[in-house]
Amino acid sequence: MPHIENSPWTVPVAQVASRPGQSKQIDADFPAPSGIGDEVIGVKEGEPVHVNGSFDSIVDGLILNASINAPVHAECTRCLKPIKRDWTTHVTAFFPYKDERDNRNQPDEVDIIAGEEESEDTYPLFDNGAFANLEALLRDTLVDELPLQPLCREDCRGLCSQCGVDLNENPDHVHETTDIRFAGLADLKAKLESEQQG
């Protein structure tokens, strides 16, 4: 496994770590990690994901505030047309400095409470706070933000349930339908009418 500093998702943060009030700007592309979405909607592994924001140093860690822009491929769940668009979302994540108390066998009450309230948007720093790795953050953020049922447009009319024609392109498309539940009555009516005429 390569060293963390050689990872394409690693950002050096040693210059701001442990110095509250410092800030490090980030404006760069990172390759999309694997496992973002599926064939219906997702981000292809290796596609450039742009991160624009800053790491801000506080007493107990770094806060990342950034916008994430990713090229999303999707299929409209109504009309099945392919969709390609850039998807932008905002993220705030916490990268805490390693606490020396983590090495103790018995956590005290403060540790337990902190553990229960710890945010899901918390990620580790590596090499004594020298590096932040964005791989998991990018994956988690994009997986959470992608819609479960993507649409090519909000008012997509979808496909005809009988013949599959695109109702967006053929808004007046209709089928003459006969309710098969009344087919027997129609046959009986025709038979009675023919007997009366005979």
Image (cartoon, rainbow, N blue to C red):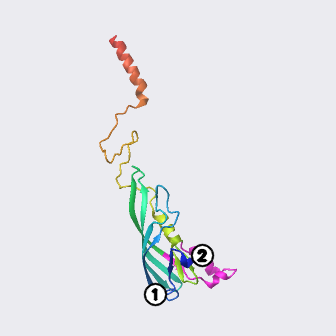
Picture coordinates of residue 112 (x, y %)? 62, 77
Quadrant housing residue 88: bottom left
Residue type beneath disc 2? Gly
Front position in the image: 143 or 85: 85
Is 116 in the magenta? yes
Disc nearer the start of the sequence (1/2): 1
Residue type beneath disc 1? Gln
Circle 1/circle 2 CB separation < 8 Å:
no
- Split into 4 quadrants, where in the image is the N terminus? bottom right
Whole-angstrom CA distance, mark 1 to mark 2, is: 26 Å
Instruction: State the residue position of label 2.
Output: 115
Instruction: State the residue position of label 1.
Output: 22
Q: Which label belongs to residue 106?
A: none
Quadrant housing residue 60: bottom right
- Outermost residue on the left side: it is 172
Residue shown at 58% from the left, 74% from the top: 2
Picture coordinates of residue 162 (x, y %)? 40, 39
Front position in the image: 41 or 4: 4
The boundaries of the magenta stretch are: 93-119
Left or right of 180? Residue 59 is: right
Picture coordinates of residue 158 (x, y %)? 38, 48
Q: How dense is the environment of label 2, judged by Cα within 10 Å: few (below 14), some, or many (20 and up)?
A: few
Q: Answer above or below: position of 38 versus 194.
A: below
Assign a secondary structure to mark 1.
loop
